[in-house]
Image (cartoon, rainbow, N blue to C red):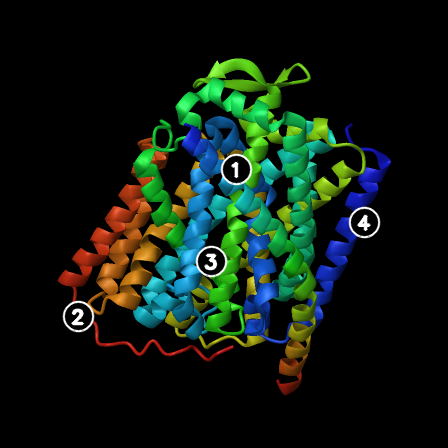
Amino acid sequence: MNFTAIDWAIVIVYLAASVSVGLIGKRYVGKLSHYLVAGRELGLYLGIATLAATEIGTITFMYNAELGYKYGFAAFAAAMISGIVMIIVGRTGFVISRFRELKLMTVPEYFEIKYSRGLRIVTGFLVALGGILNMGVFLKIEGEFLTIVSGIDTRHIVVVMTIILVLELAYTVLGGMVSVVITDFIQYVLLSVATILVSIYAVYHAGWGNIVNKVTTVMGEGGFNPISNPKFGLIFLIWQVLLWFSVHTCWQTTAMRMFSTKSPETSKRVMTWTGFIFLGRGVLPMLWGIAALTLFGTGALTGGIPAPVVNGHTLAPIDAMPAMLANILGPGIRGIVVAGMLAATMSVNSSYLLGWSAVISQDVIMPIRRALGKGALSSRSQILVNRVANLFVSLFLMFWGLYYTPPGAVYLYLNITGTIFLAGAFVCVIGGLYWRRSNTLGGYLAMLAGAVGAIVPFFFLHWSENVTGFTAFGLAAGGLIIGSLLGRKKPAVSQEPITAD
Amino acid sequence: MNLWLYFWTISLIVAGASFAFITVVVTWKGAHDLREWFSSLNRQNKEK
């Protein structure tokens, strides 16, 4: 056991405070728009805190550290692209500004305004499928992190995962977005402190000169130059640009933060400033991974990279960073860092639970009810459906997290599962907003071709992530263009804001 | 390789400094946002 009494005390105090504060949120939830989009009243700083906390989790630290361990400084390219693209989206208001004007609650909701109710249901299904598969690996990897750093027996990983999930569920189910935003604010502060502390410790213990030497010795030019690195290359970088444009505009949990801001102008400013945080979100944990390679990369070579060996045990590259933290952090600091990582974990998971269950409820169940001729549910009943969806998503996550191990780097698995809906959704949204000719047939073809283009090549044909990504986006774009040209020209749609709250 | 190393070193400094600076500003001013937001939610609930 690596944890001392003071570490346990810090973690327990954090958990108690976080859950208690989260439960306060329930008293402010009066209607559906409070539950899903925080009453659309978030200001700039709270918006930045909740967006950053939503997209920075232990899973983010783990997969970025894994990339740093395997690919050295060259991995920084992916982090820089994610941040720079976010700044561009924020500055220009590309998609997000128009989305905010429409007063949406979910991304698929736009599909009913522009295309049809049927396409909204199909998109809702694909968004929920891709999102939940994406989130499915979070718990297992977060559990690994916590057991390694704290020293809890790895056989207890299921118990650790269950405790994490139950705590998040407690306030997310009851208070929805209100609770999530309140806890996000506290969690953002704590996870940021932990991120800065770990970065300082990692460089101090590994030594900057040693870090550079290790990458030079193990990887050579490919450890610095992303274009000459065999895993990356120009095609990968172009795909990353495309992928991050789609993530920052159409990813449900990010988009929900944009929908929750006071105004379109606020949403642009939130996105821009969070873009600068995104630079550190990627680069700093990648640095931790490189530090772990420097300190523990002494094992047998796999793909030219030495496996991490910690205290005589050979680990997987993704576990090198938490093992490093267990070794370099002292009592007290270890407690603060684990509390910070728990904060990161809970902020991401609660937001994702809310995001995907909102899609199931608002874009699958509700439209199907209306299609069957049943009347609209009251705001209170819709909140209840959201809560039940939240519970079902949680159960699936437990199951998937226990039995599925992603092949290859986790970052790339997350990219591909996201692409299942992002390819089609991004193409349809761009077409819907900026191409008058786009129509419902084109929308259907884009969503289905994008999903098939992501699932078949990656899961069945085992193509590389780059090729899979381009295939999915290419097929989706082709589907929209061909379908729109072949199908009936749709009469102009007003795309007026939705007023029902 | 040296050029790339310089580039990544500067990127790391910019990223780390931005991360730390924004954390301080958001922590300081976010509390004010939080109070305003609660008032606004209360107002919406009363109007309802």
In this rendering, position of residue A60 left or right of residue A159: left
Q: Which mark is residue A274?
A: none
Mark number displayed over residue A252: 3
Q: CA distance from mark 4 to mark 1?
A: 28 Å
Q: Chain of mark 4?
A: A
How far, Cα to Cα, is label 2 from label 3? 29 Å
Query: Are tags 1 and 3 found on a single chain?
Result: yes
Asked if both marks, 4 and 2, belong to the same chain, the answer given is yes
First in sequence: mark 4 vs mark 2:
4
Q: Is residue A373 left or right of residue A235?
A: right
Can you identify the residue that label 1 sits on? Answer: A64
Badge 2 marks a residue whose secondary structure is loop
Q: What is the quadrant of the N terminus of chain A in the image?
A: top right
Q: Which residue is mark 2?
A: A489
* Measured Cα–Cα span from mark 4 to mark 2: 60 Å
- Residue at the image point whose x is 56% and y is 34% from the top: A287
Residue at 76%, 59% in the rendered image: A20
